[in-house]
Amino acid sequence: MKESIENRSFIYDIPTKVYFGKNQLNNLGKELSVYGKKVLLCYGGGSIKKSGLYDRVISEIENAGLELFELGGIAPNPRIESVNAGADICKRENIDVLLAVGGGSVLDCTKYIGAGAFYDGDAWDILLEKVPVKKCLPVVTVLTLAATGSEMDASGVISNPDTKDKIGLIFPAMQPKVSFLDPTETFSVNKYQTACGCSDILSHIIESYFVPENESMYMLDRFKEGMMRTLINYAPVALAQPDNYEARANLMWTSSWAINGFTGSLQNCEWTCHPIEHELSAIYDITHGLGLAILTPKWMKYVLDEKTADRFYTYGVEVFGIDPSLSKMDVANKSIELTEDFLYNTLGLSSTLTEIKIDDKNFDVMAEKACCGDVLYGFKPLNKENIKEIFKMCL
Ligand code: NZQ
Ligand code: ZN
C-alpha cells in the first residue's frame, strides 16, 4: 500500500467559497455583484416560497440593485427540458450570474444551465459528451437540503424522460463560486427527504471508503469513519427534532465534505452503487437516496468474500463499534446488518424494490446501462450479470 501511495499524486483545489451558518445570506447581494448585474434565480417546486427563503433572497437581490430573472419548477431528478429553458433565458437576456436556491436537483440543473448558455444546440449534447464544457456562467448556490454535495462539487446529474437516461458528469467549470449553507434552511425538510439525504451522504462516503487497498489512505479512512459516525449519530436527532441546529449543521457540513473531492484523493476506481442507482431513478423517477438505501446492503452482501472482508471488518469496528475480537467474517456480516438497521429502522426507508412497486422487467437493460456494457471497476469489479444479480436481491 505504501508503494502505491508513493506512485499516486493529486491536485486538491476546491474553488468554492462557503458561507456557513445563520444570517450569512446577508452577504448574498455582495457576492452576486462580483459577477455582474443580471441574475437568473433558479428554484424548484415551491418549498422556498413556503419557507420564506424566496422573499429573503429577492430582497437581497433588490437591495444590491441587481436585475432579477427567474426559472422555477425545477423537478427532483431534474430534466433536460429545464436546462434548455434556463439556457435560453441566459442567451436571450445576457445573464451574468446564476443563483441556485434549493436541493441538489436545483443546483445540478443550474450548473448545466450555466454550461448550456455557451452552447447553441440542445444541452443534452453536453450530457452525451458531444461537446466539452469549457465555460460556464458563474454559479452561486443557497442550499436547502443536506444530501448531494452539489454545493461544493463540480458534478451534476440530469434526466432525459424521453430516452429514460440519467447522466452525471463532472466539469470543473461548473464548480459553484460561492455556496451559502445555513442549517436553519433545512429545518423544513420533511422526514422522508431528510432520510433520503442521509442515505445519499452515507453512500457517498461508502463509495470512496470501500476501495481496493491500494487506493486507500490511513488518514482518509479515519476521516471517512468520523463522517459516517457523525451521520449515524445525528440523523436520528434531525428526524426526531427537525429544528435541532446542531444536528442539521453536522449533516449539512458532512454532506459537503463527503463528495467535494477530498475523500476521493488518490483514487482511480469507479463508484458502484451510484451508477446502478441512477438507472433506477432514470426509469422510475424514484428519490436517489431511497434507491441507494435499497441497493447498498445488497451490494455489500454480494461483494463480501474472504478477500474483501478486511475492509468490512474495519468498517464494522470503527463505524459501528463492533467487538474487534470477533472473527473477521462475523464482524463483516454484522456490519452489513447494522447498515441495514440504520437505513431501514433508523431512517425508516424501504428495503426492497417490491415495496416500492418495482419489478424485474427492466433489470436487463438497467444492468447493461449501469456498466455501459462493460465492467464497473470498483471495490470489486461487476459486470452486467453481477449487477443483475444485485437487482434481483433487491426484490
Ligand atoms: O422542489 P422543491 O419544492 O424545492 O422541494 C424539494 C424536492 O421536492 C424538497 N426540498 C428541498 N429543500 C427543502 C425541501 N422541502 C422542504 N424544505 C426544504 N428546505 O426536497 C425534494 C427533493 O429535492 P432534491 O433537490 O431533488 O433532492 P436532493 O438534494 O437529494 O437532490 C437529488 C438529485 O441530485 C443528484 C441525484 O441523482 C438527484 O437527481 N445527485 C447529485 C450529485 C452531485 N451534484 O454531486 C451527487 C449525488 O450522488 C446525486 O446523484
Ligand atoms: Zn448520491
Image: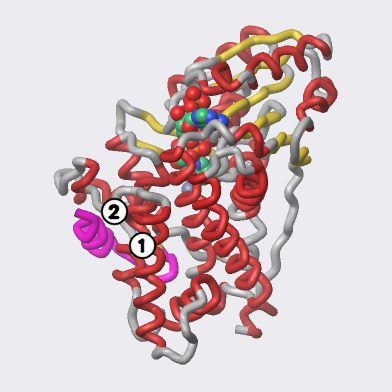
Colouring scheme applied when the structure was drawn: secondary structure
Q: Secondary structure at mark 2?
A: loop
Label 2 neighbourhood size at 10 Å, few (<14), some (14-19), many (20+)? many
- Residue placed most toward the observer, 94 or 233: 233
The residue to which callout 2 is attached is 351
Where on the picture, by quarter, is residue 267?
bottom right
- Residue placed most toward the observer, 344 or 260: 344
Q: Which sits earlier in the primary sequence, circle 1 or circle 2?
A: 1
Question: Is 114 on the left-hand or right-hand side of 378?
Answer: right
Question: Is 11 on the left-hand or right-hand side of 88?
Answer: right
Label 1 neighbourhood size at 10 Å, few (<14), some (14-19), many (20+)? many
Q: CA distance from mark 1 to mark 2?
A: 8 Å
Q: Are marks 1 and 2 in contact (CB under 8 Å)?
A: yes
Residue 116 to residue 150: above or below: above
Residue positioned 36% across, 62% down in the render: 340
The residue to which callout 1 is attached is 340
Question: Is 205 on the left-hand or right-hand side of 8?
Answer: left
Where on the picture, by quarter, is residue 101?
top right
Residue 84 to residue 349: above or below: above
Residue 238: x percent and y percent?
Answer: 54, 46
Q: In the image, which residues are magenta? A: 377-395
Image quarter in which the C terminus is found: bottom left
Residue 326: x percent and y percent?
Answer: 42, 89
Question: Is 319 on the left-hand or right-hand side of 217?
Answer: left
Name which residue type carries label 2.
Ser
User: Does the residue tagged 2 have its C-beta within 8 Å of any atom of ligand 2?
Assistant: no
Does the segment drawn in magenta span residue 388?
A: yes
Residue positioned 71% across, 36% down in the render: 179
Residue positioned 57% across, 16% down in the render: 49
- Residue placed most toward the observer, 281 or 345: 345
Residue 391: x percent and y percent?
Answer: 24, 56
Where on the picture, by quarter, is residue 217?
bottom right
